[in-house]
Image: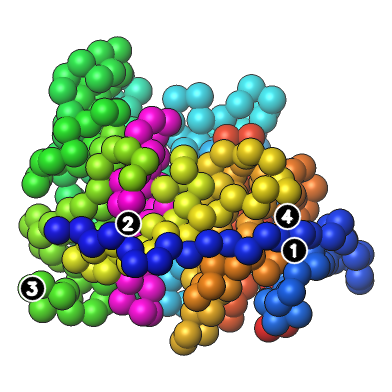
């Protein structure tokens, strides 16, 4: 049974000064807003030259064709600090008309090295007659690299999470049945997958419903004692965190639709939108429609709620779209993607206080349009993936700590 938190964490009132941008040596430096603890928070500068231009291919007619990614679903980091991105350019209407007649979809999975060069790429772009991804998850969304460097991918338009070898040559595991979701056949009758969408049944031990994110635990499971438990934010159709063992067998779940403690917002899709495992043994989940992060132990008992809703920025929505923890052993800082105001907030994790931010609305380097996910490498550099109108990746290099 889920426990009610003894004391939910409240944010202290945050009064930012005007954002400050300094142009130094051709690089845009992001100055943090004034805050009581801002001097102790990490600071970042955007790298406007990351990533490098994508390859140009020559077709059989001798015409140059430029790779374009389309919407970037997510990014994750492998053991060599290569940034793995999953994108939707290969899907129907994945590229926009204004991207030019000579643009072609990039491979669905691209790996960039620290300098921004394409280190590898893979992914079967085959579509079904209905225009759905035939092999990869449809609506390719979250990604995660486990301790063996296997790459996990979810899809928010069908019912699977897939585990791939690092080079993409072999699918090692699939949780769920492709195209069959944990929901009635009337959810999306005109969709290639009519059982996928909200409200799902939120109960199957074998099926998912449009999962959003994945995290794999390298530590022993608190119930089974086995390593490699898979935590899935089953959130675009269902409203739960569901846990499977490393072989894909159901272990447990928690969460439902609603506004109470331990519940995820009822409508709007993508709730929970993220799941992240901390060094403290806790599970951090994004309830983005209710502007909060819910923190559970690994058995699903609610430990605390961290609101993310600074009043000075109005009544924006989807403030807790994705999160990342800093790479110091104590994981002192929590980075939160605020889709409503196109920012990344930096929180002091223990208190939940906002101590800084990155970005703001716009299309210039260091600004965001529809920031979707973030990830931090071993050196503390931050990578943001933008989707819908943003359709790009950006790198922010850590300046100090």
Is residue 49 in view?
Answer: no
| Residue assigned mark 2 | 214
Cα distance, mark 1 to mark 4? 9 Å
The spot of residue 300 in percent (x, y) is 22, 61
Cα distance, mark 4 to mark 3? 42 Å
The spot of residue 243 in percent (x, y) is 19, 58
Cα distance, mark 3 to mark 1? 43 Å
Name the mark on residue 38: none
- Residue at the image position 69 percent from the left and 41 percent from the top: 314
The spot of residue 192 in percent (x, y) is 27, 21
| Residue assigned mark 1 | 46
Highlighted magenta segment, given as a residue range: 261-286
Mark closer to the observer (3, 1) = 3
| Residue assigned mark 4 | 359
- Residue at the image position 29 percent from the left and 34 percent from the top: 237
Secondary structure predominantly adopted by residues drawn in magenta:
loop
Tell whether label 1 touches label 3 (CB within 8 Å): no
Q: Is residue 311 above or below residue 157?
A: below
Side (left or right) of 219 relative to 97? left
């Amino acid at each position: 049974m889920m426990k009610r938190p003894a004391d939910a964490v409240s944010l202290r009132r945050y009064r930012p000064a005007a954002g400050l941008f300094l142009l130094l040596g051709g690089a845009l430096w992001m100055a943090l807003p004034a805050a009581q603890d801002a001097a102790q928070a990490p600071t970042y500068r955007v790298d406007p030259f990351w990533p490098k231009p994508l390859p140009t291919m020559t077709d059989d007619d001798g015409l140059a064709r430029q790779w374009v990614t389309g919407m970037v679903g997510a990014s994750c980091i492998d053991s060599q600090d290569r940034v793995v991105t999953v994108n939707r350019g290969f899907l129907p209407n994945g590229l926009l008309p204004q991207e030019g007649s000579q643009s072609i979809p990039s491979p669905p999975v691209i790996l960039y090295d620290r300098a921004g060069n394409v280190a590898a790429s893979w992914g079967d772009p085959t579509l079904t007659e209905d225009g759905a991804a035939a092999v990869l998850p449809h609506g390719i969304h979250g990604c995660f690299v486990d301790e063996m460097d296997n790459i996990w991918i979810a899809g928010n338009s069908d019912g699977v999470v897939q585990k791939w070898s690092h080079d993409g040559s072999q699918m090692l595991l699939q949780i769920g049945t492709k195209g069959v979701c944990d929901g009635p056949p009337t959810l999306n009758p005109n969709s290639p997958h009519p059982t996928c969408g909200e409200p799902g049944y939120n109960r199957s031990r074998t099926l998912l419903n449009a999962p959003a994110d994945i995290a794999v635990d390298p530590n022993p499971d608190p119930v089974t004692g086995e390593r490699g438990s898979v935590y899935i934010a089953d959130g675009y159709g269902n409203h739960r965190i569901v846990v499977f063992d490393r072989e894909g067998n159901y272990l447990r779940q928690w969460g439902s639709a609603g506004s109470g403690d331990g519940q995820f917002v009822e409508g709007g899709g993508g709730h929970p939108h993220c799941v992240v495992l901390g060094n403290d043994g806790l599970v951090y989940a994004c309830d983005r429609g209710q502007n909060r992060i819910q923190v559970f132990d690994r058995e699903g008992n609610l430990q605390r709620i961290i609101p993310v809703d600074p009043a000075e920025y109005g009544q924006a929505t989807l403030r807790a779209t994705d999160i990342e923890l800093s790479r110091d052993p104590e994981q002192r800082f929590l980075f939160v993607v605020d889709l409503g105001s196109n920012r990344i907030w930096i929180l002091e994790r223990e208190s939940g206080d906002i101590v800084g931010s990155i970005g703001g609305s716009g299309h210039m380097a260091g600004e965001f349009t529809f920031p979707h996910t973030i990830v931090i490498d071993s050196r503390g550099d931050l990578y943001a993936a933008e989707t819908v109108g943003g359709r790009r990746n950006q790198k922010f290099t850590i300046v100090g700590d």
